[in-house]
Image: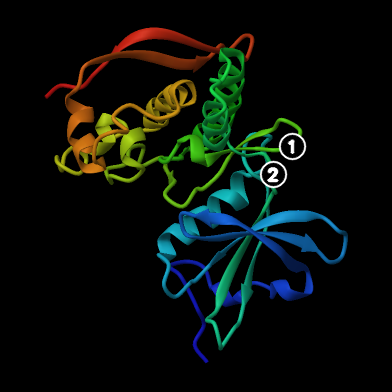
Amino acid sequence: MLSVTGKTIIFDSFPDPSDTWEIIETIGKGTYGKVFKVLNKKNGQKAAVKILDPVHDIDEEIEAEYNILKGLSDHPNVVKFYGMYFKKDKKNGDQLWLVLELCSGGSVTDLVKGLLKRGESMKEVLIAYILREALLGLQHLHNNKTIHRDVKGNNILLTTDGGVKLVDFGVSAQLTSTRLHRNTSVGTPFWMAPEVIACEQQLDTNYDARCDAWSLGITAIELGDGDPPLADVHPMRALFKIPRTKKRGKHIGLNKNTGNAFSSEVLCYTQN
């Protein structure tokens, strides 16, 4: 029998989840699989599991998420990782289980949409808190030479005690001492930085971890308005317009002395 493998990981070497985890209910659908609430049969702990199909899903993305979660999830603002499991199922197909911290508060996109339905908007103090916590998570990733590359409201989750967690590392990239920049265009169009979009059009263009700061700035607008800029146009049209539009926006950063988030108005644009 042949092993189920990715480029560097033998997927069917992971333990079977059936002895430890029991599915309770469906939570939703992530970028690369369905998400369920699960119960630990041994200690009663609840968690979330993202179930992936290693045959039909893109192995590179699965491995990227596994490696980043395994190495970098020990941070208050990154979703905790409880392990990867492999479930053999001849009838429905083999499955990979990524078991993660349960963030019952949902995404910050869900939160702002819910407020808007009630005719309310998110308070600036809450936006500042979410941005500060997300920045601390990004700072942790960047200090460990990792770019998230898909920062947006749907990938920032809340716990019931007010925790703010970065999730969904399927398109994240790890940098090395010999490769400090990336040149592949990935992410969600409305949140993508101009230099990331440019990689699709110009072979000699690259980018670094600062692209996450742009995406978080767009997320700040999303939290205030309910949608990112250009949300009313087709995503392909947005990819065309973002690198060519000069706009005033907010520069988001962390004060190194206090740890507080700050913003300053800057002119954000790239050359045509």
Q: Mark number for residue 160?
A: 1
Kind of residue at disc 1: Thr
Quarter in which the C terminus is drawn: top left
Near-viewer residue (154 or 86): 154
Q: How is the image coloured?
A: rainbow
Residue 161 appears in view: yes
Q: Is there a contact, CB below 8 Å, between mark 2 and mark 1?
A: yes
Q: Is residue 37 above or below residue 272?
A: below
Question: Is 143 placed left or right of 210 in the picture?
Answer: right
Image quarter of residue 43: bottom right
Question: Is 207 placed left or right of 110 in the picture?
Answer: left
Q: Residue at x 59, y 26 (%)?
A: 136
Indicate the secondary structure of the residue bearing disc 1.
loop
Q: Is residue 118 above or below residue 157?
A: above
Q: Residue at x 28, y 30 (%)?
A: 230
* Residue located beneath label 2 in the image: 104
Q: Is residue 200 above or below residue 208?
A: below
Q: Residue at x 36, y 37 (%)?
A: 180
Residue 155: x %, y % from top left: 51, 41
